[in-house]
C-alpha cells in the first residue's frame, strides 16, 4: 500500500508539472489571440478612421488586420500541436505510467 | 427551382442510404451517442466543419458582407478564432473526462445530482434556443429556394432529422455532416475559382470595384453593428460561446483519444477557416456583380446572396449553367440546415436520455438497452417539438434566439466547464450559481434589448455577452464561496486533474 501511495503521489506531482508546463505555453498563446481578436473588435468599434487607412488600393488596414487574424489562428494551431506533441504528451505519458503502476483502470 | 429540387433529392437519397447503413451499426449507448468513439481525426474534422458552418454561416456571412461590408468579415472571422479556445483548453480535457455529454464531465468532477441537473438545464436551453431559429430559418429558406410552403418545409426538415438521429444516431449524424461539409467546400471552391477568373487572379480588384460602386464607407466597420460594445460583445460571444455549445462539445467524444481530438480541431480550423475567409470575397463579389439592390429585392435579409452569386457565375438567370449553380448552392444550403438540426437533436437527446434518465433518475443504474430506446424516442419527441415551435415561430423575429443561444453558451456553460476543469475549490454551489446567473442574465438582457423591443429597448445592446459573461463567472464564484468548502471534492481534484490531462481515471 505504501508503495502504491508513493506512486500515486508521484503521478499527482507529474500532473502538477504538466499543468505548469501547459500554463507556461498556453497563457501567452491565449493572450496573443485574445488581444489580436478582441483588440480588433475594439478598434472596429472605436477607431473607424484607423481601420480605413488604405493599404493596397481600396484594401484597408481593417481588412489587413482581419487577414492577419486568420493567419495568426492557423499559426497558433500549428504551434500548439507541435508543443503538445513534444512537451505535453511525454509528461502526460509519464504520469500515466506512474498511475498505471499504482493500479488504476482506464 | 426544379434543378434545386432534383439536386436536393439526390443529396437526400445519399443521406438516407447513410442512415440505413448507420442504423445497422447503432445498437449500444456508445454507438448511439458517440459513434463508438471510433472516428478518425479527418472524419471528425470534416464533421466539425459541418457543425460549425450552419446556414447562418454558409448563407449569412456572404449576405452580411455583400450588404454591410467589413462587419460581415468580422462575423466570418470569429468562429475560426473560437477554435483557438477549443483547441487550447476544451477539446482534449473533454475527451479525457466525458463519455457522451457535458453532464458527464460535470458529474465526474462534482459527484452530485444537483450539479448534473443544472448542466442539463444549460444544455437543453442552449440547444432549443439554437434549434428553434434553425427550424424557422429552414422554413423561410426552403420556401424561397424551392417554393415549398413554410409549414411543409418545417415539417419536412423535422421528419428528416428525426429519421437521421432516431435510426442512425451519431454515426448517421456524423456522415450527414461530412457529406454536407464536402459539398459545401466544393461549392465554395468552385465559386472562388470562378470569381478569381473574373478578376484575373487579383482579389484586391474586388475591394477596388466594391469601393468604386458603393464608396469608401462600405469597406469600413460599423455599418451593421452600430454600437461599438455590440462589436466587442459579438467577439466575446464567438470566442467563448462557441466553445460552450453542447452539440459541438459532443463531437469530441466521437474520437478515441485526446491526440485525435487535437488533430480533428486542426482539420476544422483549416477547412472551415478557409471557407469563412472565402465568404468575405464572395460577399464583395456579390455586391459588385449581383448588386445590393437585387440582393435586397430577393428577400430573406441577404440570405439569398450566395445562391444569386452562383447563378450569376454560372451564366446568369435562365441559362443552364446559372440554373445548375443556383440549384447546387441552394440544395447544399438545405442540406446544411438538415445536418445542423440533426446534431442539435442528438445532443439534446443525450442530455435527456443519458444525463437525465440514466444518470439522474435511475442513478446511473439504467439498463443500456432501455437507455438507447429512450434516446431514440427522445429524438422523436424533440423533433416533433421542434416542428411545432418552428411553425409557431413563423413571422416572429427569431434572430434574438440565435444570439441568446450563443450568449447562454458563453455565459453559463463556458464558465461552469472551465472552472470545473481547472479550479480546485469549485463546487456544486458554483455550478448552480454560474448556470443560474449566466442563464438568467443572458435571457433577461436579450429580452429587454433592441433585438426584442426595438426602439423601446430598456438596454442598448443586441448581444449582451459582454455583461452576462462576467456575471456568469461572478455567479459561479459566489456560488462556490457562499456554499462553503467541499473538502471531499477538493481532495478528489488531484485525481480529476489526472483524468483531465491523461484520460486515466482512478475508480
Image (cartoon, coloured by chain):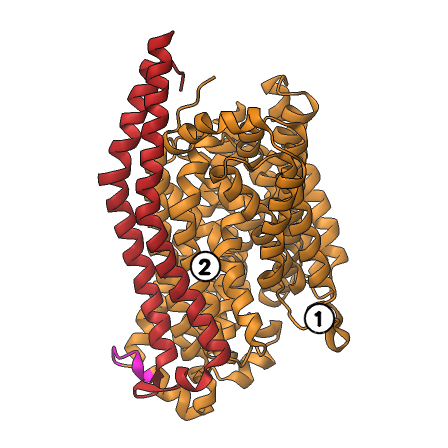
Chain colours: A red, B orange
Residues B46 and A7: in front is A7
Label at residue B459: 1
Secondary structure beneath dot 2 equals helix
Label at residue B331: none
Q: Chain of mark 2?
A: B
- Determine whether, in the image, residue B280 is placed left or right of residue B423: left
Q: Which residues are magenta?
A: B200-205
Residues B125 and B421: in front is B421
Please identify, in this view, whether the residue under mark 2 or under mark 1 is nearer the observer.
Answer: 1
Which sits earlier in the primary sequence, circle 2 or circle 1? 2
As drawn, B78 above or below B380: below
Tell me which residue sits at (39%, 24%) in the image.
Answer: B504
Secondary structure beneath dot 1 equals loop
Tell me which residue sits at (62%, 20%) in the image.
Answer: B364
Q: Chain of mark 1?
A: B
Residue B305 % position (x, y): 50, 73
Tell me which residue sits at (63%, 18%) in the image.
Answer: B366
How many marks the image carries: the answer is: 2
- Determine whether, in the image, residue B412 is placed left or right of residue B65: right
Q: Main secondary structure of the magenta part?
A: loop
Crowd class of label 1 (few under 14; some 14 to 19; many from 20; radius 10 Å): some
Q: CA distance from mark 2 to mark 1?
A: 26 Å
Q: Residue at label 2? A: B79
Amino acid at each position: 500500500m505504501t508503495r502504491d501511495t508513493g506512486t500515486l503521489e508521484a503521478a499527482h506531482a507529474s500532473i502538477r508539472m504538466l499543468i505548469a508546463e501547459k500554463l507556461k505555453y498556453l497563457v501567452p498563446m491565449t493572450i496573443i489571440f485574445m488581444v489580436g481578436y478582441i483588440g480588433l473588435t475594439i478598434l472596429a468599434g472605436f477607431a473607424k478612421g484607423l481601420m480605413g487607412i488604405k493599404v493596397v488600393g481600396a484594401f484597408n488596414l481593417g481588412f489587413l488586420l482581419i487577414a492577419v487574424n486568420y493567419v495568426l489562428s492557423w499559426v497558433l494551431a500549428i504551434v500548439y500541436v507541435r508543443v503538445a506533441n513534444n512537451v505535453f504528451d511525454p509528461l502526460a505519458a509519464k504520469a500515466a505510467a506512474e498511475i498505471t503502476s499504482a493500479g488504476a483502470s482506464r | 427551382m426544379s434543378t434545386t429540387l432534383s439536386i436536393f433529392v439526390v443529396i437526400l437519397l445519399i443521406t438516407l442510404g447513410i442512415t440505413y447503413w448507420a442504423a445497422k451499426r447503432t445498437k449500444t449507448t456508445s454507438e448511439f451517442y458517440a459513434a463508438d468513439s471510433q472516428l478518425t481525426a479527418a472524419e471528425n474534422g470534416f464533421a466539425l466543419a459541418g457543425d460549425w458552418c450552419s446556414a447562418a454561416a454558409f448563407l449569412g456571412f456572404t449576405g452580411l458582407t455583400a450588404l454591410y461590408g467589413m462587419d460581415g468579415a468580422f462575423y466570418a472571422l470569429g468562429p475560426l478564432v473560437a477554435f483557438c479556445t477549443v483547441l487550447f483548453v476544451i477539446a482534449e480535457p473533454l475527451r479525457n473526462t466525458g463519455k457522451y455529454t457535458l453532464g458527464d464531465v460535470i458529474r465526474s468532477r462534482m459527484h452530485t445530482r444537483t450539479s448534473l441537473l443544472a448542466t442539463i438545464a444549460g444544455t437543453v436551453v442552449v440547444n432549443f434556443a439554437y434549434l428553434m431559429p434553425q427550424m424557422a430559418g429552414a422554413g423561410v429558406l426552403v420556401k424561397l429556394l424551392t417554393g415549398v410552403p413554410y409549414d411543409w418545409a418545417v415539417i419536412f426538415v423535422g421528419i428528416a432529422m428525426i429519421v437521421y438521429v432516431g435510426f442512425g444516431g451519431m454515426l448517421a449524424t456524423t456522415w450527414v455532416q461530412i457529406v454536407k461539409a464536402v459539398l459545401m467546400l466544393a461549392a465554395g471552391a468552385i465559386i472562388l475559382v470562378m470569381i478569381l477568373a473574373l478578376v484575373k487572379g487579383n482579389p484586391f480588384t474586388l475591394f477596388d470595384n466594391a469601393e468604386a460602386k458603393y464608396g469608401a464607407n462600405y469597406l469600413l466597420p460599423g455599418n451593421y453593428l452600430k454600437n461599438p460594445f455590440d462589436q466587442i460583445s459579438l467577439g466575446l460571444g464567438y470566442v467563448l460561446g462557441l466553445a460552450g455549445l453542447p452539440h459541438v462539445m459532443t463531437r469530441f467524444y466521437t474520437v478515441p483519444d485526446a491526440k485525435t481530438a487535437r488533430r480533428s480541431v486542426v482539420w476544422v480550423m483549416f477547412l472551415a477557416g478557409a471557407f469563412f475567409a472565402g465568404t468575405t470575397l464572395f460577399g464583395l463579389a456579390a455586391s459588385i456583380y449581383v448588386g445590393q439592390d437585387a440582393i435586397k429585392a430577393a428577400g430573406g435579409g441577404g440570405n439569398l446572396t450566395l445562391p444569386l452569386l452562383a447563378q450569376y457565375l454560372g451564366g446568369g438567370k435562365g441559362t443552364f449553367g446559372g440554373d445548375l449553380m443556383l440549384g447546387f448552392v441552394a440544395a447544399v444550403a438545405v442540406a446544411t440546415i438538415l445536418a445542423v438540426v440533426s446534431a442539435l437533436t442528438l445532443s439534446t437527446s443525450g442530455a435527456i436520455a443519458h444525463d437525465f434518465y440514466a444518470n439522474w433518475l435511475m442513478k446511473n443504474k439504467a439498463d443500456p438497452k432501455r437507455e438507447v430506446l429512450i434516446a431514440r424516442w427522445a429524438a422523436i419527441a424533440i423533433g416533433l417539438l421542434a416542428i411545432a415551435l418552428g411553425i409557431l415561430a413563423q413571422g416572429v423575429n427569431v434572430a434574438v434566439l440565435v444570439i441568446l443561444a450563443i450568449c447562454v453558451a458563453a455565459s453559463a456553460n463556458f464558465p461552469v466547464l472551465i472552472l470545473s476543469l481547472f479550479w480546485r475549490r469549485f463546487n456544486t454551489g458554483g455550478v448552480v450559481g454560474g448556470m443560474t446567473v449566466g442563464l438568467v442574465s443572458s435571457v433577461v438582457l436579450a429580452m429587454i434589448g433592441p433585438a426584442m423591443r426595438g426602439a423601446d429597448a430598456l438596454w442598448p445592446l443586441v448581444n449582451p455577452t459582454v455583461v452576462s459573461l462576467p456575471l456568469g463567472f461572478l455567479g459561479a464564484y459566489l456560488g462556490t464561496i457562499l456554499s462553503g468548502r467541499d473538502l471531499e471534492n477538493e481532495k478528489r481534484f488531484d485525481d480529476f486533474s489526472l483524468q483531465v490531462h491523461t484520460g486515466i481515471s482512478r475508480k
